[in-house]
Amino acid sequence: MSYSSSTNTCSITFTVDKDMTQPVYLYYRLTNFYQNHRRYVKSFDANQLSNTGIGSNGSPPPTPTSVCSPLSRPTDAPVGTYKWVPTVNGVQTFDANAVIYPCGLIANSYFSDVIGPLVGTSGNVTFSQSNIAWPSDAAKFQKSSLFTQGTISGNITTMVFPPPQWITAFPEKDFSNGYTFTNYPDVSTMQRFQVWMRPAGLPNFRKLWGSLSSDLLSGEYTVQITDNFDVNTFGGTKSIVISTVSILGGKNPFLGIAYIVVGVVCWIFGLLFLARHMIKPRKLGDYTYLSWNQPQRGPAGGEGASTGGPSGQPTYQPPYTYFSTQLLLITTLATATIAYFTTMPARTTLSPMPTGRNQHLPMNRLMTQITYKHLRFVIFDAPTDSNVSVYADELLRRNVTLVVRACDPTYTAAILEARGIRVRECAFADGAVPSRELIDAFLVLCRAHFNTVNSDPDEIPAIGVHCVAGLGRAPILVAMALIDAGMTALEAAEFIRERRRGAFNSVQLKYLVDEYKPRSTSSQIGGTWFGFKKKNIATLNSPTPSLVAATVTGADDLLGGHSPIGSEIGDEETGNCVGISVQGLPMTHVVTTKKTGFMASWFGKKAVGA
């Protein structure tokens, strides 16, 4: 390689070892040139390049958009760049409508080296710039009407200016005195410029200079390159690449190297996970909890008897074959998806609706009925003042007489209470689990509400429980009631999830399975101590005392009126109750039944009728 400073040219001699079949491509390669910088990428005017918005004869050139910043007008160029503009008192004055064409940083930094033909023993080889740009890119560049005689008023040299770097970077174009009607750039035919205007994504890149439609024969070649593009300003390098392409593109080992590296990393992680499993294997789940091994529940909401197995354990049934299972799963998912989208109402339908017998059907996707033994709950999301009346209609249809609100108020409770539905507060943090006090209070409320010994299960009024979405706080309260009524934690969680998809987060599910214990054993929800059928004294197993007890002033004080749930068991802070003691012992819980007016006081093992 040789360099001539007088002509500013570089001469490179190289050898082609074997014939290169057409098409053959010549690229120039730059390093450390960050075309992907945000400000650089946005600095061009697509309307200007596509000749959009050019006015009629005599009109000024279009004003470039702000995206060309910081190189839109000649005043943005360094002082003294456009030497042909006269000065007044040493200061150059530009027309207010003067513009740079093409404007922006991308056009200003256009690669300006000139790569000559390859000179070889078998003749010269010239690379053509025809059809080297993407057709979609070429369509965006049109010849500008600014350089048509009479299009603009005034002298073209003082109205349209070349980019500052073009003045010295393209000496063969002679822009030293500005544009004329003979040397202006026609971007519609400058396909190398079109290739440059598509920014590269990495700092080291190569762009197509030309293509050869014939074979490149083996032999020695020399190429002359005019050195106009300065790479010292950004600390980079430049070179030329001659290449052919296959159906997969040009030679690029990066993708293969990336695949190998990722494969090795996966292999290493696989060994680490295998070692971890061998040292400390993960505890496997109990197959009896699989859905196909669970006993079917009876129509009344209770658990049906299993079809076999010792001690009431479900009989193990081998799973389906692999392909049958996959087919069943796909069919089930497709059916569930169709059913979901055909039955789910739009959320905006919760405006007042006609009051016919079947006009409440859109609510069936928002409310979930949970029935177990004699317990009846309805889980739903939080209504607002604008649609709470619609919720009230559905709640009454489901025989809900009490609503427990597990979130901050989103509606006025008086609206429900005016319809005969009492509201109780049981709010706690979203995504969390309730405190022990709230759990005890909720369970006592359930025990008082479901005081239905010798009653028809179909006539038992339900408790409505809601939070914001009805997926976290409300389901966990209902699950605790089911556990207190005899279910295991996993059974309760699965029982609710089967009916309300997405219920419980990982924190709540872990608490139910690993930490939560039923608040009572022999006196669970629905036990005979609620009814006081024959005696005023019943045997109770008290949970750990957590609230101050008080006697209720009347039977209706327990179940009537909007108050925090603490008042159901005599929370002193509500102001509804006064503290007393029975037989000289302080009480820890008070429950009064609405039907009989009995008061059960938990102290040790006794419940005394009032």
Image: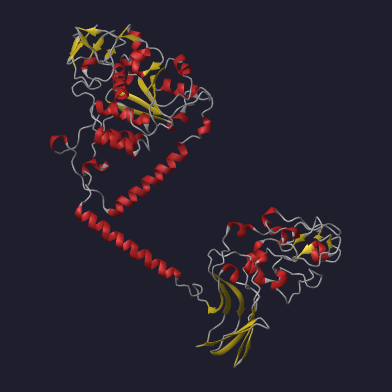
| Position in image of residue 515 (x %, y %) | 25, 33
Of 587 and 172, which appears nearest the observer? 172
Height in image: 608 above or below 252? above
For the point 54% across and 83% down, the residue is 21
| Position in image of residue 174 (x %, y %) | 76, 74
| Position in image of residue 192 (x %, y %) | 65, 72
From where the camera sits, is residue 20 visible? Answer: yes
Of 474 and 274, which appears nearest the observer? 274
For the point 68% across and 83% down, the residue is 7
> From the viewer's perspective, is 140 left or right of 352?
right
Of 163 and 482, which appears nearest the observer? 163
> From the viewer's perspective, is 453 left or right of 59?
left
The residue lying furthest to the left in this view is 310
Q: How many marks?
A: 0
The residue lying furthest to the front in this view is 89
> From the viewer's perspective, is 36 left or right of 143?
left
| Position in image of residue 491 (x %, y %) | 26, 34
Height in image: 247 above or below 121? above
Quarter of the figure with the C terminus: top left
Height in image: 250 above or below 302? below
Of 356 and 128, which appears nearest the observer? 128
> From the viewer's perspective, is 385 left or right of 329?
right
Q: Quarter of the image holding residue 80?
A: bottom right
Quarter of the figure with the N terminus: bottom right
